[in-house]
Amino acid sequence: MNNFSQIFRDGMWKSNVAFVQLLGLCPLLAVTNTVINGLGLGLATTLTLISSNVVVSMVRNFIRPEIRIPVFVLVIASVVTAIELAMNAWFHDMYKILGIFIPLIVTNCAIIARAESFASKNNVARSFADGLFMGLGFTCVLILLGALREGLGFGTLFQQAHLMFGEAARGLQITLISDYQGFLLAILPPGAFFGLGLLIAGKNIIDKRREAKQQVMASAAVAEATK
Amino acid sequence: MQLLKNMTQSAIVLGLFAVIGTGLVADIFDQTKQRIADNERASVLRNLHQLIPPDRHDNDLFNDTTTIYDARLGTNQAITVYRARIKAKPVAAIIGAIAPDGYSGAIKLLVAINYNGTLAGVRVVQHKETPGLGDRVDIERSSWILGFNGKSLNNPTENKWRVKRDGGVFDQLTGATITPRAIVKAVRNSLIYFNQHRDRLFDTVDPKDKNE
């Protein structure tokens, strides 16, 4: 059980795909101009990660090491194509916005990296958990960055929610500042770089604080013990 | 010998994966094909119905089309024209014109022209204009595009078919003149084309079939 909480912590924080491994930045930077776009791509990526991790883990004992990379590529490409078709069928408007970035999930290095470094060495359950939490960790960053950019750029949150959740979700849109003129830089690609940089810096600050706290506590414990 | 055996084994496994993967994708493609086609049709119809509401036509707007070629419409490629009719009488044509000179490349439009030559409306269906500036030509962002409603080739007159900065009657957008200018030009070109070819546009015989 301890193992799974380790996988959870790795995926969501310690080795977060976007914050720490810095993988998959191309789609991350390109689609995060709104929360909903980020959420859409995040979920599609998570689904891909889970499916490819599970399949890779299932076949890991039959594959000779020399051909494992081509096999992984085949698995990932099939999974992504299947997801792309399904999205086009059931989330057509979303699919039109995310467009090219859905097939490009294939090129997200995070997916083959997890297949190679985790799924090919672990059992199906653990690989599933790894895919799920790595994907969710990535999704969280997409949503956070989307919220930052949409809030600054348009002064709203959850605009165009109907693309994902149907017409009823139009009301989900939150206007933070009414009559907002918009801050163009946040929506344009450079805004994505600034945003991600700030978020990573924020994570590092939190990590540093934690570390310092732990050190203080550890030295206090040592002092206590030597008394 | 061992090496050969390993190689064959690998080749078979790899081949197997290719077959299974392709099979899976083919199966899903087959199962979603109809749904995707329906989605695309619904999405096109939703755009068309913004311009020509369902009560203004009784024909199959999606399939009653003709293709035209004219460089003035912004491209050398085929352009689709949707035709609205009531009891087989022409009501309006929707031309998929292109404004080739937007700020960031071509802007795809739908220009709906009533049979009498007035504009039923214009919509931008695809563009890469700057968010917050040029993208206000999109109906989702501002009502600028509605300024074309009811206009025709002679209303306003030729030298007024421009944005205000160029001495015309159409508003420009703050911080973006190039985008509106490109669209005004493309809409006017569509009107010119319509006036010259009106009856051929509504011809039910496809020009391609005529030659055969």
Image: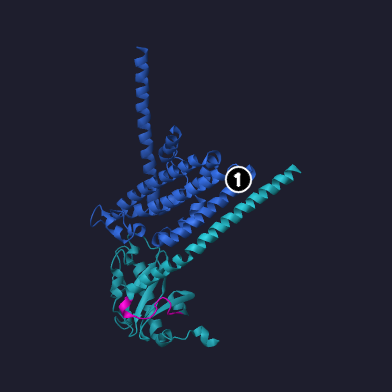
Q: Where's residue B171, x and y in %?
A: 28, 70
Name the quarter where the N terminus of chain A is drawn.
top left
The colour applied to the residues of chain B in this rendering is: cyan
Magenta span covers which residues? B52-66
Callout 1 amino acid: Arg
Name the quarter where the C terminus of chain A is drawn.
top left
- Identify the residue shown where x is 38% and y is 36%: A204
Q: Which chain is blue?
A: A
**Does residue A57 appear anywhere in the picture?**
yes
Q: Where's residue B174, x and y in %?
A: 29, 64
**Does B39 sit above or below residue B16?**
below
B64 within the magenta span: yes
What residue is shown with label 1?
A68
**Does B2 sit above or below residue A159?**
above
A208 within the magenta span: no
Residue B54 sits in quarter: bottom left
| Label 1 packing within 10 angstroms: few (<14), some (14-19), many (20+) | many
- Identify the residue shown where x is 34% and y is 19%: A220
